[in-house]
Image (cartoon, helix red, strand yellow):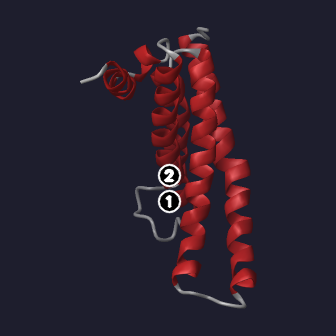
């Protein structure tokens, strides 16, 4: 395995150690952690939004705790402050994109034509409200709590 490939593999398997490595390793670590935590936050947010379709145990507290835990994991998996801020940014963008795509996908799959834009407006309003007042603050709060717990190491 080449030096470049082994460095990237190390960044994916040990992101805390790679967050202090070379620039490429830090970027790979931030992208991997950000995408995975953004994905888990998006799934929890979507389950929170579609509460009537969720199982009984998946209530507001459980799903909010999962989003909070995703924010904590960003800091604990990326020890370097610069890398963890980048990973948090990736998590927020990836989570918001995936949540919005999951809300819009049924309308696009049904090929709603001219009235599709009007039909999407309430869905997008609900998703944007949930992102602004739910997912992003919980991710940020979890991240800040992890900084207080773990310390801000630069």
Question: For the C terminus, which image quadrant?
Answer: top right
Question: For the N terminus, which image quadrant?
Answer: top left
Q: Position of residue 62 (x, y in %)?
A: 48, 47
Q: Position of residue 2 (x, y in %)?
A: 29, 22
Q: Which residue is drawn at the image coordinates 67% and 43% (left, top)? A: 136
Q: How many marks?
A: 2
Residues packed near mark 1 inside 10 Å, few (<14), some (14 to 19) or many (20 plus): many
Horizontal relation, residue 148 to residue 118: left or right: left
Q: Residue furthest bottom?
A: 114
Instruction: Name the residue that disc number 2 marks.
Output: 44
Residues packed near mark 2 inside 10 Å, few (<14), some (14 to 19) or many (20 plus): many
Q: Are marks 2 and 1 in contact (CB under 8 Å)?
A: yes
The residue lying toward the viewer, choosing from 51 and 45, is: 45
Res. 104 image quadrant: bottom right
Q: Marks 2 and 1, Cα distance to the nearest angstrom?
A: 5 Å
Q: Residue furthest front?
A: 2
Any mark on residue 47, and which?
A: 1
Q: Tell me the element at label 1.
A: helix
Horizontal relation, residue 122 to residue 49: left or right: right
Q: Position of residue 94 (x, y in %)?
A: 57, 47
Q: Which residue is drawn at the image coordinates 51% and 35% (left, top)? A: 31
The residue lying toward the viewer, choosing from 144 and 115, is: 115
In the image, residue 67 sits, relative to residue 124, either above or below, namely above
Q: Which residue is drawn at the image coordinates 44% and 65% (left, top)? A: 54
Q: Tell me the element at label 2.
A: helix
Q: Which residue is drawn at the image coordinates 65% and 31% (left, top)? A: 141
Res. 46 image quadrant: bottom right
Horizontal relation, residue 57 to residue 139: left or right: left
The residue lying toward the viewer, choosing from 96 and 46, is: 96
In the image, residue 10 sits, relative to residue 47, either above or below, namely above
Q: Position of residue 90 (x, y in %)?
A: 59, 38
């Amino acid at each position: 395995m080449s030096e470049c490939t082994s460095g990237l593999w190390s960044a994916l398997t040990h992101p805390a150690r790679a967050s202090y490595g070379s620039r490429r390793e830090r970027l790979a670590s931030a992208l991997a952690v950000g995408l995975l935590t953004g994905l888990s936050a998006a799934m929890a947010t979507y389950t929170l939004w579609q509460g009537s379709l969720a199982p009984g145990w998946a209530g507001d507290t459980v799903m909010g705790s999962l989003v909070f835990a995703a924010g904590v994991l960003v800091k604990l998996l990326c020890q370097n402050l610069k890398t963890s801020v980048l990973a948090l940014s990736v998590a927020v963008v990836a989570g918001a994109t995936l949540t919005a795509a999951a809300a819009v996908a049924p309308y696009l799959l049904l090929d709603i034509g001219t009235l599709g834009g009007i039909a999407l407006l309430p869905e997008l309003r609900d998703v944007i409200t949930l992102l602004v007042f739910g997912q992003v603050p919980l991710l940020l709060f979890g991240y800040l709590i992890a900084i207080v717990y773990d310390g801000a190491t630069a």
